[in-house]
Image: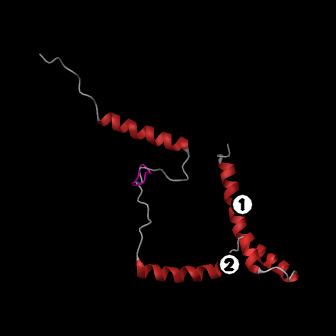
Protein backbone atom coordinates (compact mmCIF):
# COMPACT_ATOMS: atom_id res chain seq x y z
CA UNK A 1 0.00 0.00 0.00
CA UNK A 2 2.97 2.32 0.44
CA UNK A 3 3.00 3.52 -3.18
CA UNK A 4 1.88 7.10 -2.70
CA UNK A 5 4.13 9.93 -3.79
CA UNK A 6 4.48 11.06 -0.21
CA UNK A 7 5.80 7.72 1.00
CA UNK A 8 8.17 7.48 -1.98
CA UNK A 9 9.52 10.92 -1.18
CA UNK A 10 9.92 10.09 2.52
CA UNK A 11 11.76 6.87 1.66
CA UNK A 12 14.06 8.76 -0.70
CA UNK A 13 14.83 11.46 1.86
CA UNK A 14 15.50 8.85 4.57
CA UNK A 15 18.05 7.22 2.27
CA UNK A 16 19.70 10.61 1.67
CA UNK A 17 19.85 11.23 5.42
CA UNK A 18 21.43 7.81 5.97
CA UNK A 19 24.10 8.63 3.38
CA UNK A 20 24.79 11.99 5.02
CA UNK A 21 25.00 10.60 8.56
CA UNK A 22 27.00 7.46 7.72
CA UNK A 23 30.47 8.99 8.34
CA UNK A 24 29.36 10.41 11.71
CA UNK A 25 27.91 7.08 12.79
CA UNK A 26 31.11 5.32 11.79
CA UNK A 27 33.22 7.78 13.81
CA UNK A 28 30.95 7.34 16.81
CA UNK A 29 31.22 3.56 16.53
CA UNK A 30 35.01 3.76 16.30
CA UNK A 31 35.20 6.05 19.33
CA UNK A 32 33.08 3.61 21.34
CA UNK A 33 35.37 0.76 20.31
CA UNK A 34 38.48 2.70 21.33
CA UNK A 35 37.09 2.96 24.85
CA UNK A 36 36.39 -0.77 24.91
CA UNK A 37 39.80 -2.20 23.87
CA UNK A 38 38.70 -5.85 23.92
CA UNK A 39 36.84 -5.83 20.61
CA UNK A 40 38.58 -5.97 17.27
CA UNK A 41 37.53 -3.98 14.20
CA UNK A 42 37.33 -7.17 12.12
CA UNK A 43 34.63 -8.50 14.41
CA UNK A 44 32.73 -5.24 14.04
CA UNK A 45 32.95 -5.39 10.24
CA UNK A 46 31.15 -8.73 10.36
CA UNK A 47 28.34 -7.26 12.46
CA UNK A 48 28.03 -3.72 11.08
CA UNK A 49 28.36 -2.35 7.57
CA UNK A 50 31.44 -0.18 7.27
CA UNK A 51 30.87 2.71 4.87
CA UNK A 52 33.87 4.27 3.14
CA UNK A 53 33.95 8.09 3.42
CA UNK A 54 32.87 9.88 0.23
CA UNK A 55 36.28 11.44 -0.56
CA UNK A 56 38.09 8.14 -0.38
CA UNK A 57 35.35 6.41 -2.32
CA UNK A 58 35.77 8.86 -5.22
CA UNK A 59 39.51 8.16 -5.34
CA UNK A 60 38.82 4.43 -5.39
CA UNK A 61 36.29 4.87 -8.21
CA UNK A 62 38.80 6.85 -10.30
CA UNK A 63 41.33 4.06 -9.95
CA UNK A 64 38.70 1.45 -10.82
CA UNK A 65 37.60 3.44 -13.89
CA UNK A 66 41.16 3.53 -15.21
CA UNK A 67 41.37 -0.24 -14.90
CA UNK A 68 37.99 -0.67 -16.61
CA UNK A 69 39.01 1.48 -19.56
CA UNK A 70 41.94 -0.83 -20.15
CA UNK A 71 39.97 -4.06 -19.89
CA UNK A 72 36.58 -3.64 -21.48
CA UNK A 73 33.86 -1.09 -22.03
CA UNK A 74 30.26 -1.90 -21.13
CA UNK A 75 27.33 -0.07 -22.63
CA UNK A 76 25.00 0.92 -19.80
CA UNK A 77 23.12 3.75 -21.47
CA UNK A 78 19.45 3.10 -21.93
CA UNK A 79 18.13 4.21 -25.29
CA UNK A 80 14.66 5.63 -24.71
CA UNK A 81 12.07 6.97 -27.16
CA UNK A 82 11.32 10.54 -26.07
CA UNK A 83 7.75 10.46 -27.34
CA UNK A 84 6.56 7.17 -25.83
CA UNK A 85 9.17 6.99 -23.00
CA UNK A 86 9.72 3.30 -23.80
CA UNK A 87 13.25 1.89 -23.82
CA UNK A 88 14.61 -0.61 -26.34
CA UNK A 89 13.02 -3.48 -24.37
CA UNK A 90 9.57 -1.87 -24.24
CA UNK A 91 9.89 -0.92 -20.55
CA UNK A 92 8.75 2.35 -19.02
CA UNK A 93 11.01 4.35 -16.64
CA UNK A 94 11.14 3.33 -12.99
CA UNK A 95 9.68 6.61 -11.77
CA UNK A 96 6.53 6.33 -13.88
CA UNK A 97 3.43 5.08 -12.04
CA UNK A 98 0.87 2.61 -13.40
CA UNK A 99 -1.75 5.24 -14.19
CA UNK A 100 0.63 7.16 -16.45
CA UNK A 101 1.71 3.95 -18.16
CA UNK A 102 -1.90 3.00 -18.80
CA UNK A 103 -2.65 6.42 -20.35
CA UNK A 104 0.35 6.28 -22.66
CA UNK A 105 -0.48 2.74 -23.72
CA UNK A 106 -4.09 3.73 -24.50
CA UNK A 107 -2.83 6.68 -26.55
CA UNK A 108 -0.48 4.37 -28.49
CA UNK A 109 -3.25 1.83 -29.12
CA UNK A 110 -5.61 4.55 -30.30
CA UNK A 111 -3.10 5.87 -32.83
CA UNK A 112 -2.28 2.38 -34.07
CA UNK A 113 -6.00 1.60 -34.44
CA UNK A 114 -6.57 4.67 -36.64
CA UNK A 115 -3.73 3.83 -38.99
CA UNK A 116 -4.87 0.22 -39.41
CA UNK A 117 -8.45 0.86 -40.49
CA UNK A 118 -10.07 -2.35 -41.58
CA UNK A 119 -11.30 -2.54 -45.13
CA UNK A 120 -15.00 -3.19 -45.50
CA UNK A 121 -15.74 -6.77 -46.38
CA UNK A 122 -17.48 -7.08 -49.66
CA UNK A 123 -19.28 -10.00 -51.16
CA UNK A 124 -16.96 -12.17 -53.18
CA UNK A 125 -19.13 -13.55 -56.03
From the viewer's perspective, is 53 left or right of 27? left
From the viewer's perspective, is 95 left or right of 50? left
Q: Secondary structure at mark 1?
A: helix
Q: Nearer the viewer, residue 28 or 125?
A: 28
Q: Where is residue 47 drawn, in percent x and y? A: 75, 70
Q: Where is residue 115 drawn, in percent x and y? A: 30, 36
Q: Secondary structure at mark 2?
A: loop
Check if residue 50 falls in the magenta segment: no
What is the distance, in whole Å, between disc 1 and disc 2 at their CAs? 18 Å
Residue plotted at (69% across, 60% down): 13
Q: Which mark is residue 53?
A: 2
Q: Nearer the viewer, residue 46 or 118?
A: 46
Q: Residues within 10 Å of mark 1 (few under 14, many from 20)?
A: few
Q: Nearer the viewer, residue 113 or 89?
A: 89
35 relative to 9, above or below: below
Disc nearer the start of the sequence (1/2) = 1
Asked which quadrant contains residue 37, the reply is: bottom right
Q: Which mark is residue 14?
A: 1
The span picked out in magenta is: 84-89
From the viewer's perspective, is 72 left or right of 62? left
Q: Where is residue 120 drawn, in percent x and y? A: 23, 23
* Residue 76 in view in this figure: yes
The single residue placed furthest to the left in the displayed view is 125
Q: In the image, which is nearer the foreground, mark 1 or mark 2? A: 2
Residue plotted at (76% across, 75% down): 44
4 relative to 75, above or below: above
* Residue 23 in view in this figure: no
Residue plotted at (48% across, 50% down): 92
Amino acid sequence: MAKSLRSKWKRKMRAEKRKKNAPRELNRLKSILKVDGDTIMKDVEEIATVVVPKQRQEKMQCAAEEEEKDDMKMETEIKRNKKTLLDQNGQYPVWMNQRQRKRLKAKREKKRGKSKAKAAKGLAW
